Image (tube, rainbow, N blue to C red):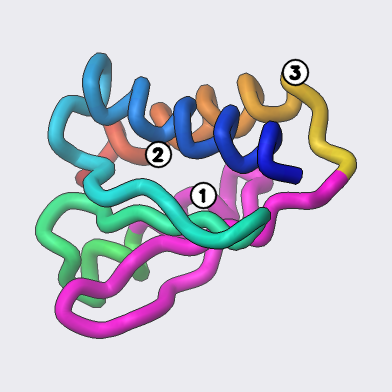
Amino acid sequence: IMDIHRKFVGMLNELNETTCKGKLQDAGGRGLMIAFTPGDGKKETVDKLTKNLFNKGMIAFSCGKDPVRVRFLVPAIIKDEDIQVAKKLLESAILEGL
């Protein structure tokens, strides 16, 4: 589980350092419950992103307040290839409107 956590959070941090620079802040969490703060951390920003992700086939939730965060409940059976698919979907959704 911690290996999956490390890889998924690493993927989020990689996006934040490259193509989506500064748009995925504070990636982390506990076990397979992983979250990050998108953009300005406002509810409207998170709602727009989670809807865009859902339309692409990826389920994410909003959580918290000031800032509102995007949360993933990552399956324990996720494979490295699946994390790369998640990366592509997330990158696409962020670049389309964050």
Residue type at mark 2: give it. Answer: Ala
Q: Provide the residue designation for mark 2.
A: 93
Give the amino acid at mark 1.
Leu
Q: Is residue 75 magenta?
A: yes
- x, y percent for residue 58: 63, 48
Q: Residue furthest right?
A: 77
Q: Secondary structure at mark 1?
A: helix
| Residue beneath the point at 41% across and 77% down | 63
Q: Which residues are magenta?
A: 49-76
Q: Are marks 1 and 2 in contact (CB under 8 Å)?
A: yes
Q: Residue at x 27, y 42 (%)?
A: 24
Q: Earlier in the sequence, mark 3 or mark 1?
A: 1
Spatial CA span between label 3 and label 1: 18 Å
Ranked by sequence position, the earlier of labels 1 and 2 is: 1
Q: Is residue 54 magenta?
A: yes
Quarter of the image where the N terminus is located: top right
Check disc 3 and report its element: helix, strand or loop.
Answer: helix
Question: Measured from the top left, where is residue 6 in percent x and y?
Answer: 56, 34
Question: How far apart are labels 1 and 2 at the CA level?
Answer: 6 Å
Q: Amino acid at mark 3?
A: Glu
Which residue bears the numbered disc 1?
53
At 27% from the left edge and 57% from the top edge, which residue is drawn? Answer: 37
Q: Nearer the viewer, mark 2 or mark 3?
A: 3
In the rendered structure, the answer to whether residue 67 lies left or right of residue 46 reads left
The quadrant in which the C terminus is found is top left
Q: Residue placed at 41% from the left, 29% from the top? A: 92
Give the residue at mark 3.
Answer: 81
The crowd level at tag 1 (other Cα within 10 Å; few <14, some 14-19, many 20+) is: many
Left/right of residue 96 with respect to residue 81 in the rendered view = left
